[in-house]
Image: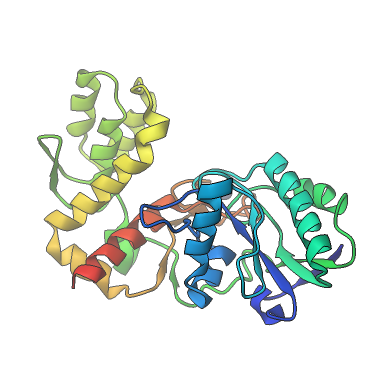
Amino acid sequence: MKEITGNLWDHHPEYIIAITTNGIIKKNGECVMGRGCAKEAKDRFPDIAKKLGTHVKLCGNHVYYLGKNVVSFPTKYGWWEDSDISLIERSTQELVALVDKSGWKSVIIPRPGCNNGRLKWSKVKPVLKKYLDNRFTVISFGSKVGTSRMNSITSFKNEFEFLSNFYTSPFVYAGYCWPTVEHAFQAAKTKFSTDKWLVRIAKTPGIAKKKGRRIALRENWEQVKVSVMTELVWLKFEYNPTLKNKLLDTKDAELIEGNYWHDNFWGDCFCKKCSDQKGKNMLGYILMQVRKEEMNKC
Ligand SMILES: [Zn+2]
């Protein structure tokens, strides 16, 4: 197994490229292609998402040849999950079997599970090393700090404060008016209606957040929190057209809720301690989804 640093696509099509994938199929039959190399593959070869979706539907979440010198390499089941080291091991074995069968001489793969999957390379490397010989090259994209953020908004402050859940943006949800997404989100967590009320009357979103940490959570909160957030963010922009226009003005910039409070679920923490993991940036992702849907309406 060889290791290099650089850009994955510089090696295409000379190398077979393994893109890290998940097992979720959308209503239109395409696989969800995530944010990383899978999305880049889809941007280059749009039919790949459908091809993978068909394979996954018929035979499950496995390594498949997708045409154009690209193969899938599952590292997780749900796109929102952390990568699964035992699935990575299985995919590695499947990849080797496919490469043997196809007679390919050189295959390149990004560090699987180490970007959006939030695994440490030190944990993944020994697993890969067990199976991969010198036909295989593992590529890393350099450190998080070094990655290009040319077209990214990485801080929801100043002119981009309106992207933050703390921004005043009244809307109606569940029969009440809420001053900010943060208020409504913290209230949606609660098991008891008295707590809900206490959160709703909080003077600032910061206070609402603090209260939200101390209340009893409703059942299944973990399962529904992303869809609740999605709905609230959508309502925020529906009720506030000025903000919606500002959101549309961000065009195709990647929206990242950069922070220093170690929130690697809703955002991406840029502190030193978190430098070897990439945040899931769920809030950024939701904002980009809302923007995309609104753009399509225009
Ligand atoms: Zn941190």
Residue 235 x %, y %: 19, 50
232 to the left or right of 65: left
277 to the left or right of 189: right
Which one is in front, 150 or 80? 80
- Looking at the rendered image, the quarter that the N terminus falls into is bottom right
Residue 165 x %, y %: 30, 50
- Looking at the rendered image, the quarter that the C terminus falls into is bottom left
Which one is in front, 72 or 38? 72
Which one is in front, 8 or 30? 30
Q: Is residue 179 visible?
A: yes
Q: Is residue 168 visible?
A: no
Which one is in front, 118 or 196? 118
Residue at the (52%, 67%) spot, across then down: 48
Residue at the (15%, 66%) spot, across then down: 242
107 to the left or right of 143: right
Residue 94 x %, y %: 75, 52
Residue at the (62%, 50%) spot, across then down: 274
